[in-house]
Image (cartoon, helix red, strand yellow):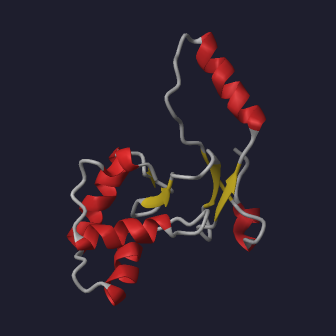
Amino acid sequence: MTADALNDLKLTRPRQAIVERILNARAGEHFSADQLWEQLRKKHKDVSKATVYRTLHLLAQKKVIEEHDFGREEKYYERMVERPHHDHLICVHCGRIIEFENAEIEQIQEKIAKQQGFTLSYHSHKLFGACSRCPQKKKLSPA
């Protein structure tokens, strides 16, 4: 994480615990605010659920984490710092999230944007379907 990203963020002890937990997250880890709060409150009794939600919102604005809507009831987050860009495959049956990188997709997106006179700032690519582990995949109709 760059120091600039947190310059104007007052790092109270609870916020520091939140930031440290996020920075120590393993690559590809996606978590909800409630999951993060459950993990933190075991060690840090002074971390409130409201502080977790507010801090996640601020960190998402500063591009330290990315907020995702994976078609569930709650938002999920993942750290962006020290991570290459990637996209997601989301299983609509078990909720499994598979990250992938594909240079060809990136080139096509850039080509389309250029053709349309559009300057890309960022994107989030999510594909929904059935993963190879789900027996329910046979019930899906083709897209």
Please indicate whether residue 14 sits to the left or right of residue 68 in the image. left
- Residue 107: which quarter of the image? top right
Residue in the picture at 57% in, 12% down: 116
Please indicate whether residue 102 sits to the left or right of residue 99 in the image. right
Q: Compare residues 40 and 105 and report the one nearer the observer.
A: 40
Please indicate whether residue 4 sits to the left or right of residue 86 in the image. left
Residue in the picture at 69% in, 32% down: 106
Q: Compare residues 92 and 32 and report the one nearer the observer.
A: 32
Q: Is residue 68 visible?
A: no
Residue in the picture at 75% in, 41% down: 102
User: Compared to 119, does 42 lie above or below?
Assistant: below
- Counting from the top left corner in percent of width and height, residue 4 is at 36, 44
- Residue 44: which quarter of the image? bottom left
On the rendered image, what quadrant is the C terminus found in?
A: top right
Please indicate whether residue 42 sits to the left or right of residue 84 in the image. left
- Counting from the top left corner in percent of width and height, residue 32 is at 42, 67
- Counting from the top left corner in percent of width and height, residue 63 is at 42, 46
User: Compared to 58, does 105 lie above or below?
Assistant: above
- Counting from the top left corner in percent of width and height, residue 115 is at 63, 11
Q: Compare residues 92 and 18 and report the one nearer the observer.
A: 18
Residue positioned most to the front: 3
How many tags in the picture? 0
User: Compared to 40, does 109 lie above or below?
Assistant: above
Q: Is residue 105 visible?
A: yes
Residue in the picture at 39% in, 74% down: 36
